[in-house]
Amino acid sequence: MRATVTIHRDFTISDIDERIYGAFLEHLGRAIYSGIYEPDHPSADENGMRKDVIDLVKELDVPVVRYPGGNFVSAYNWEDGIGPKEDRPVRLDLAWHTSESNEVGIHEFADWCESVGTEMMLAVNLGSRGLDAARNFVEYVNHPGGTYWSDLRKKNGKEEPWDVKLWCLGNEMDGPWQIGHKDAAEYGRLAAETAKAIRAFDPKLELVVCGSSHSGMPTYPDWEATVLEHTYDVVDYISLHMYFANHEKKTGNYLALTHKLEAYIDTVAGVIQFIKAKRRSKKDIYISFDEWNVWYHSSQQDRQILEGGDGWPHAPALLEDIYNFEDVLQVGLVINTFIRRADVVKIACIAQLVNVIAPIMTERGGEAWRQTIYYPYYFASRFGRGTALNLVIDCPTYDSDAYSDVSYVDISAVHNETDGTVTLFAVNRHPDESIDIDATLEGFEGLKVIDHQVMTHNDLEASNTRSAPSEVAPRQGNGAELKDGKLSASLPPYSYQMIRLG
Ligand code: AHR
């Protein structure tokens, strides 16, 4: 089987906002406690943060991390996480039916972000709380000094403000499961007034308003239209979430779900344009896809933990999906979709980063290792920065149960003008045929293949565990060749690969 691809230097989609390689950390399960924070761990630094995890996160070069939730944020009092640790209250976390010790709060998270070299994206609670708590939090975090909240921050050990640019106005407020769930008009009004207050503090801050929790929500896409009617002038992004599952164990259907993702992005981009036109506005709003990942492997285990009557445990092993090789392909496809929609998707956060539906797993007191999905995320984050190119691809297709004409080959390409590289990320969705790629590169001089990484496995269910942490890992590819502007490469069945030209 063959695919032809045309890549032209001037045929571009958009500059990629590097924040599409963001991640998410919630006070949920073992994401924080025994994930990033474990003071008794042999690798713990002076802040009690696991150095082994810091190293793995640094390797990913994550540009931004959303925090502290998630559903958790909708009943969170941010003030519980400041001041001497021994005075911090233990609270019930109503979202996940657990106990929150508050040993980690904004100071500890901010220090951790500094250690891994990432920016904070903070969410305010618009579920159980509202404008007042939000504006106080923003003042505590960003005001230099001389006021009650900023001086309290100084007293708590942080002299300079953190100057956090990116703020989320609540989380999944369309979801009946959300503490303080609201209808679109109620939420739209609250979000607009909260945004106005935050803008009164600093008009340069970037604000993210909640869109739908997923495209199957009964209120989608009216929710987006109503919320944007109220907030268009005072926010910068609308947030979308989507999780991918293969309960039916049909790989062809599973790997076609990115068509659903594309339709979701297209629809919300259309709603944004609709409201923009209605308001006769010059302003653009973009998408913050601030929760996405594969999430289904742990469903049964979670039900047992949550329904097991274990009271209100602290940091139980919730949402600990063990990813397999098939998920490598899915994560590669999702990231390719974001690269191709770099014109409207400016932020995206893999949900989540450590232990909870995450590329990094840890053992309490023990090892930390890379899950299978770590790799496509790693390659894209490290090498997918620059300008997204608009490729012309001619390739055989298949029909999944829900979508027609699903291309067997999915490719995105990124041109980095600074280092002169072109990087291709390719997934072969075919179960048993290799696909030979003939790519013509136009407008590029003197490129050659400088790296070629391939991921294949004979078992779609293969995963990485503590005892076999490298069962699914990339290997150096061979056979990719660039001659006279023609790139040829072969994509084995069910494979992910990155080809770098420079
Ligand atoms: O990431 C896990 C959960 O998924 C988040 O708390 C919530 O926002 C979403 O439903």
Image: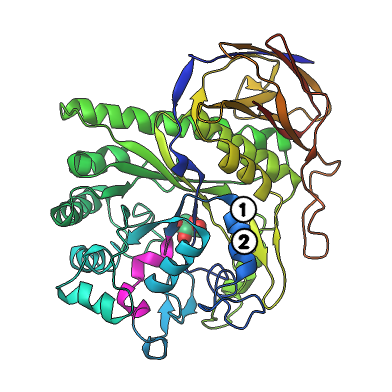
Image point (54%, 32%), residue name: 337
Which quadrant of the view contains residue 277?
Answer: top left
Is 141 situated left or right of 243 in this image?
left
- Taking depth in this image into account, of 93 and 368 the one nearest to the observer is 368
Image point (77%, 65%), residue name: 466
| Amino acid of disc 2 | Asp
What label sits on residue 55 in the rendered view?
2
Residue 291 painted magenta: no
What label sits on residue 155 in the rendered view?
none
- Taking depth in this image into account, of 452 and 172 the one nearest to the observer is 452
- Image location of residue 184, percent across then percent down: 26, 48
Numbered range of the magenta stretch:
67-82
Residue 79 painted magenta: yes
Q: Image height check: is 133 above or below 176?
A: below
Which quadrant of the view contains residue 482?
Answer: top right
Graded by Cα atoms within 10 Å as few (under 14), some (14 to 19) or many (20 or more), the crowding at tag 2 reads few
Q: Can residue 4 be seen in this snapshot?
A: yes
Q: Image height check: is 374 above or below 497?
A: below
Instruction: Say what secondary structure mark 2 lies in.
Output: helix
- Image location of residue 207, percent across then percent down: 28, 49
- Which residue lies under the disc numbered 1? 59
Picture quarter with the C terminus: top right
Graded by Cα atoms within 10 Å as few (under 14), some (14 to 19) or many (20 or more), the crowding at tag 1 reads few
Picture quarter with the N terminus: top right
- Image location of residue 7, percent across then percent down: 59, 15
- Look at the numbered discs 1 and 2 and tell me whether their residues touch, using CB distance below 8 Å: yes
- Image location of residue 135, percent across then percent down: 20, 64
